[in-house]
Amino acid sequence: MLFRIDPSAPEPIYAQIAAQVRSAAARGEVGAGERLPAARDLAESLQVNLHTVLRAYQDLRDAGLIELRRGRGAVVSAGAGRDLTPLTDAVAAVAATARRLGVPPDTTLALVREALR
């Protein structure tokens, strides 16, 4: 799994890392039992503080997407491997429509949040 971060983005780096794991799990790119990179290795490759990666992993653990196992590192949980392809496709269609209509991302997100209530 390839991680990319944008230090200039308003979203904290730990949240960017966690979002990429969530997205990969939703698309089926990482499955149950699959190991994520060791926190130290990922921090080094992204050139970020180890605690930043650990916070991302802790958030993912708290959400039930990964298990943190001593000696094995971060492992994708059984429930994280659901196939959300139909949802991902629908979200991509909404994003494409929003771009075509010139709707700003903040407005699009607000509309999606409202629809989820």
Image: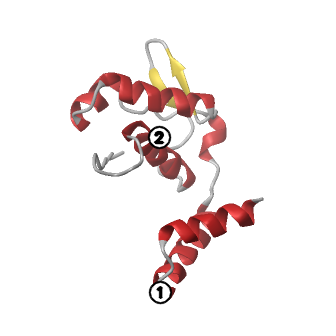
Residue depicted at x 59% and y 36%: 65
Front residue of this view, candidates 85 and 19: 19
Front residue of this view, candidates 41 and 12: 12
Residue depicted at x 49% and y 69%: 105
Using residue 24 as the reference point, say whether residue 62 is left or right of it. right
x, y (%) of residue 76? 54, 34
The amino acid marked with disc number 2 is Ala
Front residue of this view, candidates 103 and 116: 103
Q: Is residue 30 above or below residue 76?
A: below
Identify the mark at residue 18; answer none if there is no mark.
2
Using residue 97 as the reference point, say whether residue 115 is left or right of it. right
Q: The residue tagged with tag 1: helix, strand or loop? A: helix
The amino acid marked with disc number 1 is Arg
Q: Which residue lies under the disc numbered 1?
A: 100
Residue depicted at x 41% and y 36%: 14
Q: State the quadrant of the C terminus.
A: bottom right
Q: How many marks?
A: 2
Q: State the quadrant of the N terminus.
A: top left
x, y (%) of residue 30? 49, 45
x, y (%) of residue 110? 62, 65
